[in-house]
Amino acid sequence: MTSLYDTDLGKNAANYQPLTPLVFLERSASTFPDHPAIIHGKRRYSYAEFYARSRRLASALAASGIGKDDTVSVMLANTPAMLEAHYGVPMTGAVLHSINTRLDPPIIAFMLDHADAKLLIVDTEFAPAIKEALALTSVQPLVVNYRDLECGVEGMRIGDLDYEDFIGGGDPDYAWEMPSDEWNAISLNYTSGTTGNPKGVVYHHRGAALMCYANTIATGMGPHAVYLWTLPMFHCNGWCFPWSLPVVAGTHVCLRSVRAKPMYDAIADHKVTHLSGAPFVMSALLNATEEERRNFNHRVAFNHAAAPPPEAVLGAMAEAGFELTHLYGLTETYGPATINEWHEEWDTLAPDERLSKRARQGVRYVALEGLDVMDPETMQQVPPDGETLGEVMFRGNIVMKGYLKNKKATEDAFAGGWFHSGDLGVLHPDGYIQLKDRSKDIIISGGENISSIEVEDVLYKHPAVAAAAVVAKPDAKWGETPCAFIEKRPGAEVTEAEIIDYCKKKLARFKCPSRVVFTELPKTSTGKIQKFKLRDMAKTA
């Protein structure tokens, strides 16, 4: 039966447009054309210039044959080119694939092949790894070199195509089109592999647009916020903040590497209002020397993820002028999907009680429709007692489209109509969730995921290793680092340094164990290694 409100009230161009974050840049460029959009060293780009350069990039890409659903891969630091790619690539209908700059060539090669990359923009600093990766790929994308001369990075070029020359031939008035469907893919991000190759997480325009509204609300961004890029833009598309800042006509302050002095200089000189990062960013700020520090008389919002820092660190950050917001999410949820919404009355709690509140991952983001802790077998909510373990699950518009070319993994992830995070947690009586363990033994170091299984696979190939297990070891700078426990083969002799050096030849350096302990591994009666015991041992290793 036809509803009264369906009669002659259909969608049309006047009352329905696909959601996309691309319109936020267009709006700020037309409303605040002269306001600073990007600061990079001594360079400044207004919103009019940012928009024009993004359109030039889109035009140049289109002239190179890039169109709908083509993959454009980029391996870039936090630079203007990376921000321009977040707009110029999807303006053509193509999909942006940002590569972790810390990855090793074989993984990069897998991603390029799996994504069927058609064009690759690479910072010349990272060209050696890309060149080695391209020697392993079946695809041979057109390579565009980005030289960050503002930071004095000459690097190595692959071919003769230069980024500035490339976009210089593009049209600053390029007539880009809205996506035909807000469900169209906008970006591709790869997870760290757990038992095999990494999975390609596909984002859509709708989710990215909604994240922009949610980010500005959750982090308290007001008009003309100033955001310091301490979070890698390759990580979940910088939690979607490259698209979020134009919502409030904010200013992007690029930072090529996270070091104390440049951070303090940026905060003081540019009146930074917001930044994001893992615990090691806090560590860099708090451990700065007197020569590196700068005084500033305004409050700075710091959005942090991963495990909450100790109460002493929280207090030191507050004393230094930073207001902390604890977020949690996954690559599959566009970055942050929960927020530890703070209640003023908690400020008067005793330190231990206050810390227990801080340790919780919180409630759902404003753009997320469902957050729960459930029994993955029955799909029933666990008792809200703060003790019963279950799996953290998400449902809503900021959950990925799915995994590229991996139907089985997508179906498993969405079983029962919820996204299964793989993280174990509890539900508190007030509805706040708290993580307790990671069912897949993922180690989060400096905000990056490390698969313990991947590291163990390398260790098992060492001739002196009979058995190995890797768990997270708490680390003041990185949050967590891999700690390896090894049983040696009878008669074998090997040192901790030799094991670490061996891993450095097989893995990206951030995945290598920071500590190696030779011991008999605790096992169950069936021979399964008891990792919970190793986690306790790692705390004092």
Image: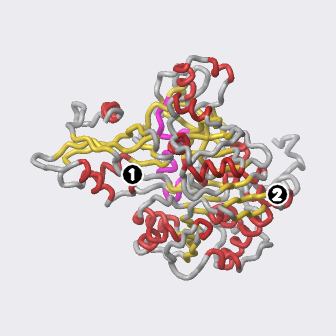
Magenta stretch holds residue 435: no
Q: Residues within 10 Å of mark 1 (few under 14, many from 20)?
A: many
Q: What's drawn in magenta, residue-wise?
A: 403-425
Residue 316 in which image quadrant:
top right
Magenta stretch holds residue 407: yes
Residue 277 in which image quadrant:
top right
Tell which residue pokes out farthest to the front in this image.
291
Which residue is rendered at x = 83% and y = 61% of the image? 34
Q: Earlier in the sequence, mark 1 or mark 2?
A: 2
- Answer left or right for 189 relative to 443: right
Secondary element type, mark 1: helix
For the residues carrying marks 1 and 2, which lies nearer the camera in this image? 1
* Amino acid type, callout 2: Arg
Numbered circle sitting on residue 464: none
- Please state which of residues 241 and 493 is positioned toward the viewer in this rendering: 493
Query: Which residue is identified by label 2?
Result: 27
Q: How is the image coloured?
A: secondary structure
Query: Which residue is identified by label 1?
Result: 511
